Amino acid sequence: MVFKNQDRLEEALAEFQQVLELDQLHEDAMQNAGYISALLGQDDEARAYYEQYLQLDPTNAVVRMNVAYQLAKAGDPLGAMQFIETGLEVDPDNVELLKQHGGFAFTAGGELSQGQEEVPAEAVELYRKALTSFSRVYDLEGAEMDVRHLQNMVAANIRLGDFQAAIDLSDQVLETHASEPSLWSYYADALRRTGQVDEAIAALERVKELDPEYPNVSARQGSWLLQEGRIDDAIPLLQQAVDRGTQTADFVCDMLFNNAYQKGIQSEEWSHAIRVMRLAKQFDITDDMRQKVDFYFGYAILKDAIVRQEPGTKETAQATLPLFQEARRLLQSASGYAQRQNRENDRLGLIDNINIYIEIQEAIIKRGR
């Protein structure tokens, strides 16, 4: 125990193993050996120790839940779920076992899904197990069910891609838990996934009413509206996120920049890129962020002006000369960003190109035709 308390885990485990060699039924040694094995990432060994411990009293649900909790605390929610699963074979309607089974299955599914673009098959199975257990608890407890478990039920449906089921469940639980902002937040996410953006925005407004400090609500609303192309509706909400301190101006600016880059620069929709980047620069951003925006902002204006300067009349020259001049100013102010990104030669090349276009427009204007 001294070794354990000093975080000398390998030495502690060796001592507990020695105790078990002397007394195979030493309960404290079994529990500690299992817990430390789990902490050390030795999941199979940890489960073996705990299985041995449970054999002393296999029908005791309290002992089983304590063992599962220790496994989960040590970083093995899958093993914890499996221990609870065995208990449910004996006592299938034990509400506390069902709650723990659902919670551990949900956590284990989340760990397997982390960093994955698609939910792995193993995680899908775990989320379905979580839903089965939580649904049984809901049948038994109804409106008295803990809100955290209700959240996990909605979240599990969302992660499984069953958005309509998440909406239907949210509609049901919000009849009895209408004052829970987290449930409205999950509801909003499910609505947005089915294309009901206005309804999703309204659900997040309800979150703000219930909890003005709930994180990232305005930023999510703004992001969803951006994705829908509703730029003018998104800007006030993004500004609100900055004003409330839930997001930095740089974060919001970068969100707008990414929209301008993906839907403007990459698709050569120069007017979209110019409009969104001009709005992005209205936020109180850092100099590093400003230079990043200026580099691509200047590039977009240049490309747009090249198209507009055709067919090279006095009218087109007068209209595009200020655009070329603005593009040059923006690129001239982005030297720091270009150097950091090893794009200084690109920046200088663009400026040289702009200077040629400026000379051409000035000559056309001077010529008068």
Image (tube, rainbow, N blue to C red):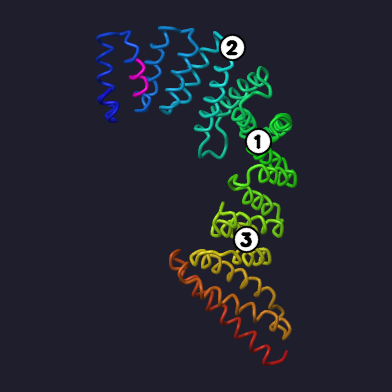
Q: Residue at x 27, y 30 (%)?
A: 6
Q: Quarter of the image for the C terminus: give it.
A: bottom right
The Cα–Cα distance between marks 2 and 3, rounded to whole angstroms, is 54 Å
| Residue 33 belongs to magenta span | yes
Q: Position of residue 294 (x, y in %)?
A: 55, 69
Q: Position of residue 242 (x, y in %)?
A: 58, 57
Local secondary structure at mark 2 = loop
Q: Are marks 1 and 2 in contact (CB under 8 Å)?
A: no
The Cα–Cα distance between marks 1 and 2, rounded to whole angstroms, is 30 Å
Judged left or right of residue 300, residue 14 is left
Q: Position of residue 182 (x, y in %)?
A: 63, 37
Residue type highlighted by circle 1: Glu
Q: Which residue is mark 1?
A: 180
Q: Earlier in the sequence, mark 1 or mark 2?
A: 2
Q: Which residue is mark 3?
A: 260
Judged left or right of residue 6, residue 368 is right
Local secondary structure at mark 1 = loop
| Residue 175 belongs to magenta span | no
Of marks 1 and 2, the one in the foreground: 1
Residue span colored magenta: 30-36
Of marks 1 and 3, the one in the foreground: 1
Residue type highlighted by circle 2: Pro
Give above or below for 341 relative to 190. below
In front: 246, or 365?
A: 246
Give above or below for 217 relative to 335. above
Numbered circle sitting on residue 92 = 2
Q: Main secondary structure of the magenta part?
A: helix
